[in-house]
Image (cartoon, helix red, strand yellow):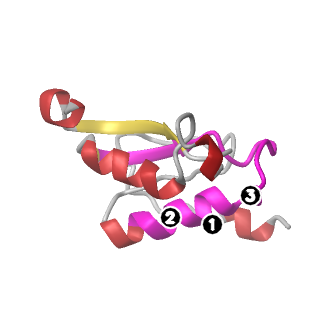
Amino acid sequence: MIGEQYGPFDLVVLECGQYNEYWNAIHMMPEQTVRAAADLRASVLFPVHWGKFTLSLHAWDEPIIRAVAEAKRKGVVLIHPLIGEKVLLSAPDVRFSAWWESIK
C-alpha cells in the first residue's frame, strides 16, 4: 500500500540481517527485503543491518549473498558498497565489488 500511495521511491534503505525464522515479526529475511523494495516500487535498494556484528545464527555474509541472489532473480537494483565507501545517489547503477568474498 505504501508503494502504491507514496511511490515510486528513488532509494529505499531496508534492514537485511540478523534474522532468524523465530524472529520473523521483527527482522526480514533477505528475500523479504528484496520483495519489500519491489513492493515499495523502489528504483534502488540499499540493504543495511548486516555485516557489522553477529546477533543471529547465520554467517555474517549470508544476508548479502542471499539478497544479491534474490535481487538478480527479481530484477531489483541493489547497491552494496564496502562499509565506508561513498555512493553517488545520482549514479546508483555503479557496479560494486562483492567485497565480502575477499574477507574470510
Residue depth check, mark 1 versus mark 3: number of the one nearer the observer:
3
Q: Give the residue type at disc 1.
A: Ala
Residue depth check, mark 2 versus mark 1: number of the one nearer the observer:
2
Q: Which residues are magenta?
A: 43-71
Name the residue located 49 percent from the left edge and 70 percent from the top edge.
69
Is residue 17 a member of the stretch shown in magenta?
no
Which residue does the numbered mark 3 point to in the structure image?
Answer: 58
In the picture, which quadrant includes the N terminus? top left
37 vs 55, left or right, is: left
Relative image position of residue 52 (x, y in whole percent)? 76, 42
How far separated are the C-alphas under marks 2 and 1? Answer: 10 Å
How far separated are the C-alphas under marks 2 and 3? Answer: 16 Å
Q: Give the residue type at disc 2.
A: Val
Which residue does the numbered mark 2 point to in the structure image?
Answer: 68
Helix, strand or loop status at disc 3: loop
Relative image position of residue 8 (x, y in whole percent)? 19, 38
Tell me if label 1 and label 3 are in contact, CB under 8 Å. no
Q: Residue furthest top?
A: 6
Q: Give the residue type at disc 3.
A: His
Helix, strand or loop status at disc 1: loop
Which comes before the other along the chain, label 1 or label 3?
A: 3
In the picture, which quadrant includes the C terminus? bottom right
Residue 72 or residue 82, whichever sits in front = 72
